[in-house]
Amino acid sequence: MKYFIINRGDEVSQALHERFIRLADQYGLTLDEEQPDTVLSIGGDGTMLQAFHRYKDQLDRLSFVGLHTGRLGFFADWKPEELDTMARVMARPPEEHPHSFVEYPLLSIELHTADGMESRLALNEFTIKGIEETMVARLDVNDVIFETFRGDGICISSPSGSTAYNKSLGGAVIHPSIPCLQITEIASINNRVFRTVGSPLVLPKHHHCDIYPQAGKRMSFSLDHLGFQRDNLVSIRTSVAKETIRFARYRPYPFWSRVQRAFIGQEPTEF
Ligand code: NAP
């Protein structure tokens, strides 16, 4: 089994990285940066985003696993004190853990500019915002005009991203086994001229959403942890990607337990 490690860069993550390499040697795992079977992320959810973007061209052949070095995240199942167990479990032949992979949906983004089309994938979300002024854009769902948006911007998230920026915007938390995307507004202006639905929309995997911003405006985008700008944008199409991300799950850790621990984190109050 070939592996590679991406760590957050802090002292604790770096030390665990080095310790894992020593353990992996003992268990017969091979370090391979070019074509790993498993990519281990040591750090937080943000570290997994980096790992995903680094290996997004090999999604059909590799899986990801996460070890957290802060609070327990959504993409990381393992704790630092479990490093040894983790290396041992990873070294087991695949036939000994046949059900230990889960596949989660990704977001597909097509940026149509005056120069052509750029295709991107997001694990969490994609956002579009204006730069000098509020963003004005027409939003179509399945090629039918839905609304004219005016405000700070629009966030389109995957189910995995529903617990990230989307949640801060009032979006719903969605189980990542549901292939869908969610559209949330970022500070929309609502008056007699500009009227938006005002609620998050959840689209199934066979639907798509097109955004047509006002022509000639420079726009700012975020794709997970990455940011970029364009001044020649024509439209953006988002849909559920045909690609998925595969996580190695060597033991059960239900999504709703992650949500509970991340956002509530205490025993329910007696009543
Ligand atoms: P960051 O600004 O350093 O961290 C953003 C926070 O989001 C971190 O606490 C990170 O967890 C957490 N996070 C990332 N993915 C998550 C997920 N799927 N579910 C729940 N929490 C998640 O930036 P970053 O670490 O590079 O992460 C980029 C992400 O930040 C974006 O994808 C976006 O979702 C999020 N973001 C959120 C807001 C907001 O909520 N207002 C605004 C901008 C961006 P860790 O500490 O475990 O890494």
Image (tube, rainbow, N blue to C red):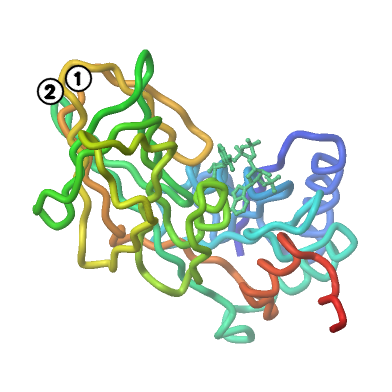
> Dividing the picture into quarters, in which one does residue 202 lie?
bottom left
Q: Secondary structure at mark 1?
A: loop
Could you tell me which residue is drawn at 53 percent across and 62 percent down?
63
Q: Nearer the viewer, residue 156 or 113?
A: 156
Left or right: where 208 falls relative to 70: left
Where on the image, by quarter, is ligand 1?
Answer: top right
Residue 54 visible somewhere in the drawing = yes
Question: What residue is pinned by disc 2?
Answer: 114
Q: Nearer the viewer, residue 7 or 266?
A: 266
Q: Residues within 10 Å of mark 1 (few under 14, many from 20)?
A: some
- Residue 133 on image: x %, y %: 35, 17
Left or right: where 133 falls relative to 239: right
- Residue 146 on image: x %, y %: 17, 51
User: Where is 37 relative to 123, above or below?
Assistant: below
**Of label 2 and label 1, which has the lower sequence position?**
2
User: Where is 130 relative to 245, above or below?
Assistant: above
Report the amino acid beneath label 1.
Asn
- Residue 17 on image: x %, y %: 78, 46
Q: Residue furthest left?
A: 144
Could you tell me which residue is drawn at 71 percent across and 65 percent down?
77
Q: Nearer the viewer, residue 123 or 13?
A: 123
Question: What residue is pinned by disc 1?
Answer: 232
Q: Nearer the viewer, residue 251 or 163?
A: 163
Could you tell me which residue is drawn at 30 percent across and 32 percent down?
150
Separation of marks 2 and 1 at Cα, in angstroms: 6 Å
Report the amino acid beneath label 2.
Ala
User: Does the closest atom of ligand 1 sit within 8 Å of the Cβ of label 2?
Assistant: no
